[in-house]
Amino acid sequence: MMTEKAYAKLNLTLSITGRLPDGYHSLETVMQTVSLCDDVAVRKRSGISVSCGALSGENNLAYKAARVFFESTGIKGGAEIEIEKRIPVCGGFGGGSADAAAVLRALDSLYGTRLGKDGLCRIALTLGADVPFLVQGGTALCTGKGENMRRIECKTPLYYCVCAPAEGASTARMFAESDKYSFYIRQSGAMADALMRSDPFAAARALHNDFTDICGSLFPSTVLCRAALMTCGALGVSLTGSGSGCFGIFADEASAKNAESALKKDFYAVFAQSVV
């Protein structure tokens, strides 16, 4: 059996930069994995199965990851997958993608395919835009669908309080809504520089996400989450992904943990730090 941590991601920046010929949106985004995670256990078995509470079965992206792994490698194998969920669903934290990435890493080890991160990322791209980044983790500037990644080296962790309302946002719906808007493309250089210097104050100033206003208009509870984080002393707050989840950057670990304590009576709230 192999066990993997499936780390959530935060989009510290997210700009919609256009449309690709295949119809997908192109993005520029700085993503960072954080300590909030699911636990994924994978065993060799005949066939493929996924146990994940109400998310069990063939529709789970982890199931699709296993199927694509065996199709791509030509191995006649199977996998029994058990997922302990902690990452909120439909929050923009990449939980399903993180689970799929963890399955790919586990199967690569279990079956000795030695695909390496480049090989796994090629498979991962067929599963979703976030999956290649989540195969690798850390911090990266990602462009295109997310497949073009430039790693950003961070010296020390940053501290967050992750917050999510009860309502989840459909990624497909949010991208469809975004087509009604025009965006000024903001570059991510200031964020990359702040992260390389491990400067939470500069990182807070560089936060941006093109989905913020769209998500706020559809899900007012997201606006309440962001306001609550600021009240608890966040240096800056932002949406992650297309929402509805958000996060605040804090000056230190104690401040982020205090925010978690203050917010969890009204929202899903948890302390997290960057995983490099």
Image: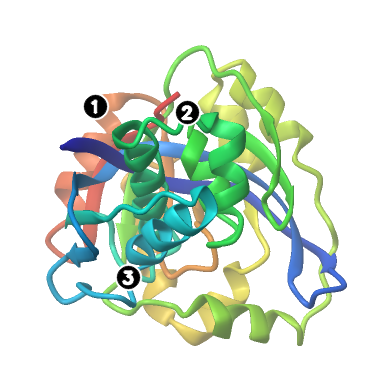
Q: Residue at label 2?
A: 114
Of callouts 2 and 3, the N-terminal one: 3
Q: Position of residue 36 (x, y in %)?
A: 28, 43
Q: Which mark is residue 162?
A: none
Amino acid at the residue labelled 3? Asn
Left or right: 101 in relation to 36: right
* SS assignment at label 3: loop
For residue 76, what is the image quadrant? bottom left
Left or right: 31 in relation to 150: left
Q: Is residue 20 above or below residue 194?
A: below
Q: Residue at label 1?
A: 254
Amino acid at the residue labelled 1? Ala
Q: Which mark is residue 60?
A: 3
Q: Position of residue 184 (x, y in %)?
A: 85, 62
Q: Residues under labels 1 and 2: Cα distance?
A: 41 Å
Asked whether residue 33 is in view, the answer is yes
* SS assignment at label 1: helix
Quadrant in which the N terminus is drawn: top left
**Residue at horizontal 61%, vertical 15%?**
197
**Residue at horizontal 60%, vertical 25%?**
195
Amino acid at the residue labelled 2? Arg
**From the viewer's perspective, is the residue at label 1 or at label 2 nearer?**
2
Q: Residues under labels 2 and 3: Cα distance?
A: 25 Å
* SS assignment at label 2: loop
Residue nearest the observer in this picture, 61 or 94 = 61
Residues at circles 1 and 3 in contact by the CB criterion of under 8 Å: no
